[in-house]
Each structure stands twice: as C-alpha cells, then as structure tokens.
Amino acid sequence: EQLSYALDLMEARGDIDPASPQAEAFVQDYVKDTIMHEVGHALGLRHNFRASRVYTEAQLSDAEFTRTHGTTGSVMEYNAVNLPAPGRPPVTAFQTMLGPYDHWAIEYAYKPIAAPDEPAELQRIAARSNEPLLAFGTDEDAAFGIDPETLQLDLGADPIAYAAKRLEI
C-alpha cells in the first residue's frame, strides 16, 4: 500500500518515471526494508510500532539526516513511506538500515559474553531501555490501545505534523 501510494504520487507530480532506474532503486529500497524486517523476525525481534516516533519532522525532511540515520528507530516498525512535502527535495523514503533499537536488541540477544560476566553485562545492556532512540511498543500496545504513541504506519515524533504534511502532499 505504501509503495503504491508513493509511486503513484511521484508519477503524478512528475518526480519519477515508472520505467526509470530511479523507480527501480526506489522499489529496491522498499524490498530491502521488507527483507530486513522479516530477517529481524527470524532473529527473534518483535514488531516495534513506537520506533516511528523517535525522529522529528525536521529530521525526516533532511536528506542528509535520513541518508545517515534512516527514517525510524527500527526495521521492526510498519513504516509509513517518508515523502517530501511539495517543493521540497527528496529524502530517504524507506528504512534501509538497522535502527538504534535493532542494534540494541541484537546486542542483548546475541552478544557473546563470558559466563561469569553474563548477568552484569545483560543488566548493563538492558539498563539503556529508557533511551529515547530505543523506544518500544509492540502488537499488543497497538492493538489494545494501551499506548497511544504506538501506532502503525505513522512517522515522526509529532502525529499532527505528520498528518498536516500528508494533507499538504
């Protein structure tokens, strides 16, 4: 749905030719995002629907920032496509790299630790859970409305700014 929406919008705006190498690269970025998400599941990671809230609209509108940091805190999010507002330069549209949460969760699950040091090292890693870039909310938080900041297909720290941008688009 997000890929089709983005391609239709960019074609209508004249930003992309569907038969161009740019369109192919755009679709490949979407495929990479999806594969990384599914590999995350294979590694034992759950959905993280709060990860979309870790970056601001200003950061998401900055091409250099999104190229360096991606669009969200985790590949385990169901990401909305990051599209520029009309007249703004292109930005990274999909999460094509591991986010801070992913690195942290994989470290906790898979870091080789010597037996006597394991409890203390796991506690040290887990103690980072309150860092803003490691925000976490999973399926139950979203489905049961436990956490209003744990949503699917949103993007950015401010849901009103996201909605306003989508209306502008």
Image (cartoon, rainbow, N blue to C red):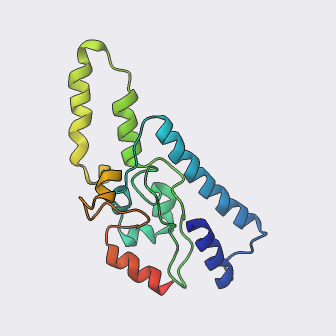
Image x and y of residue 81, in percent: 52, 67
Relative vertical location of residue 4 with respect to residue 98 in this rendering, above or below: below
At 70% from the left and 75% from the top, the residue drawn is 16
Question: Which residue is most to the front?
Answer: 144
At 26% from the left and 20% from the top, the residue drawn is 118
Image x and y of residue 124, in percent: 22, 32
In-image side of 154 versus 125 (left or right): right
Quarter of image, res 72: bottom left
In-image side of 124 versus 69 (left or right): left
Relative vertical location of residue 68 with respect to residue 39 in this rendering, above or below: below
Image x and y of residue 35, in percent: 58, 46
In-image side of 31 versus 105 (left or right): right
At 39% from the left and 83% from the top, the residue drawn is 164
Q: How many marks can you see?
A: 0
Quarter of image, res 126: top left
Q: Nearer the viewer, residue 129 or 144?
A: 144
Quarter of image, res 55: bottom left
At 32% from the left and 58% from the top, the residue drawn is 142
Residue 48 visible at all: yes
Residue 137 visible at all: no
Image x and y of residue 7, in percent: 65, 72
Q: Quadrant of the N terminus?
A: bottom right
